[in-house]
Amino acid sequence: MKKFICMITSAITLSACNMPKENPVTSPDTFDYNVEQFADIGILRYRVEGFESLSLQQKKMIYYLSQAAVAGRDIFFDQNGKWNLAIRRTLEAVYENYKGNRDNDQFKALEQYLKQVWFASGIHHHYSMDKFKPEFSKEFFAETVQSIDNSLLPLKEGESKEDLIANLSPVIFDPSIDAKRVNQAAGEDLIQTSACNYYEGVTQEEAESFYNNMKDLKDETPVSYGLNSRLVKKDGKIQELVWKTDGLYGEALKEVVYWLDKAKSVAENEAQQAYIEKLIDFNKSGDLKTFDEYAILWVKDTISDIDFVNGFTESYGDPLGMKASWESVVNFKNKEASKRTETISENAQWFEDHSPVDKRFKKETVKGISAKVITAAMLGGDCYPATPIGINLPNSNWIRRDHGSKSVTIENITKAYDMASLGNGFNEEFVWSDTEQDLMKKYGFISDNMHTDLHECLGHGSGKLLSGVDPDALKAYGSTLEEARADLFALYYIADPKLVELGLLPNGDAYKAEYYRYIMNGLMTQLTRIEPGKSVEESHMRNRQLIAKWIFEKGAPDNVIELKKRDGKTFVIINDYDKMRTLVGELLAEVQRIKSEGDYEAGKNLVENYGVKVDANLHKEILDRYARLQIKPYKGFVNPIYIPITNDEGEITDIKIAYDEGYAEQMLRYSKEFNALPTYNN
Ligand code: ZN
């Protein structure tokens, strides 16, 4: 599971608009976090502090893993939609070879569209899941593609340029085709109305019964059914096409394995070597039991400094929440900051015992929650360029129950957000008074990081399912409710005097910064990410609105939270922080009950009643105020470059890190260096 950044810290200054790429960053004092902006996106860069002081062996390992992190990039494009690679490769050919006027509006619009496609790893917005609307014409597209040499275009055997244009044009320009990557609208066939490439020719009902037939609810240690395959109907028969080195996506997975194998040779210890070996086995066999064995070995390795995720991990991109997108994060431990999360982990049992949920749903023994603060060194697949700030894995419920989970806060990413947003005017516009602004100035960064720590280290790891309850019982509402559970756990404890006692927060006021930020975001400011007329769809956003609206409504008799107008602008005021915490506790108890019992109806009602609908007037007001600030609502990152230095014998003697690569430059390089996957994968 992942936690994504909320609005405030994701804000960015306007100054870097379309800054040219040549801004080499070497000195720490002049590190420039802003790279460029386009559409609704701001591109930042992150610093890998501490890389220079790693040993040569560790640097090599990070280099090999960083190659493995990019090697699976095209898998994610194809998972997001079957036309994505063809469209990206065609546009890249145009972008690099077009001889016409590159300053005209049509070409500029095509360039922006390509940047959006790179960012979203496909033609659908990474967050709203809606298909992008190109601002260049169908005619311009046809004309530019016509002008490109055949050898540069991703033509299939026997396919002409005219065919390619005819095939891609409707997908790009007709809004009714593949309108949504992941459709979550209740009552519709979620598979047939979603453009993602996890199913072919099957209905939702067929897919659900296919997997229900596989499941044995008495199995205490079930594999993650459907995790690593596309479900297709061929000749009337439903079957899985498994993603493995000699199966679907094999060409890319072979490259991943090549680099993992190199990383294995410089692993820090045998435990680490063993789990890399298992991961390689899994990539070769596609056997989900092997995947579980890997996950168990991985979660037990808490001594290595370097760590990574590489493979099919999160299932947010599948409307049924089973099939996992390919992703990678390479990182190493930030030892100083990890003292904070270690303190939380050491007290995990105390937190579990004192939580406001029913005893039946609590873990008697909280097993091995290992929590650390990490420095990201490379992002790939579903973690790039948009990236989470916290990750908690593995996702398998029984592995978490029996073996625990690893939880990380990615602090060089949160720091980059924070640095890039200094002075952008967001708080001045949306925060009610100096009192709240001061709270946020003083405690915003620390309380936000603390929320992430609690969400990841404790929230996702807390509670248990009653035996016999299907882990997928909440179906399409599962992700939202799981995020709500983790957020509520974090919100409940961030206000606990225990945190001050443990030295994790400076005083009893610090949590108020997070309470205020959370409610303001959930009730108002996250609406900046939603287009007029649309409702909330993404699961983290649904969760935040669900929590904020529920507390707002339940606290109304006591005036716990108010929405007040000043000069025609709406503001959030929290009148009673103590009472708000009580309500957080009540909702946590209910959401845990829903999860533990698999109460689908109650879960559905909570999400549909509080998490989805948008007040049109408030929405318009927030969008107008936000537009005046000219802040981009979404952020992502370019990666650093790792450059191996070799001696005359070809041995690596050092790895240098550089931060001077621009966004388009990086995307084009990745597309060229890691292009093993065919354009169409069937
Ligand atoms: Zn989460």
Image: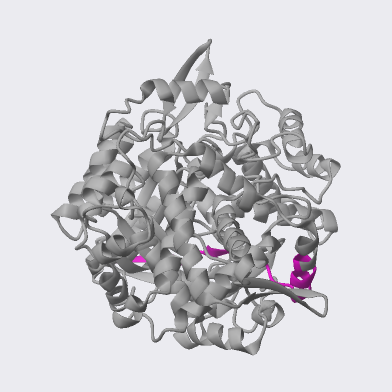
Image coords of residue 242 (percent x, y):
40, 28
Query: Which quarter of the picture shows residue 434?
Result: bottom right
Q: Is residue 633 magenta?
A: yes
Q: Is residue 466 magenta?
A: no
**Depth order, front residue of 314/397:** 397
Question: In the rendered structure, which segment of residues is drawn in magenta?
Answer: 622-648
Say left or right for 475 vs 258. Answer: right
Q: Residue at x 47, y 42 (%)?
A: 315
Say left or right for 585 vs 543. Answer: left
How many marks the image carries: the answer is: 0
**Depth order, front residue of 212/247:** 212
Image coords of residue 92 (percent x, y):
65, 48
Image coords of residue 543 (percent x, y):
55, 55
* Residue 42 in view here: no
Say left or right for 375 vs 403. Answer: right
Which residue of the protein is positioned furthest toward the front in this rendering? 557
* Residue 343 in view here: yes
* Placement of 534 over or under 487, stated as above or below: above
Q: Residue at x 78, y 51 (%)?
A: 533
**Depth order, front residue of 248/609:** 609
* Placement of 279 over or under 299, stated as above or below: above
Colour scheme employed for the rendering of this structure: one colour
* Placement of 325 over or under 509, stated as above or below: above
Q: Residue at x 36, y 39 (%)?
A: 254
Which residue of the protein is positioned furthest toward the left in this rendering? 270
* Placement of 52 over or under 382, stated as above or below: below
Say left or right for 579 vs 390. Answer: right
Image coords of residue 459 (percent x, y):
38, 59
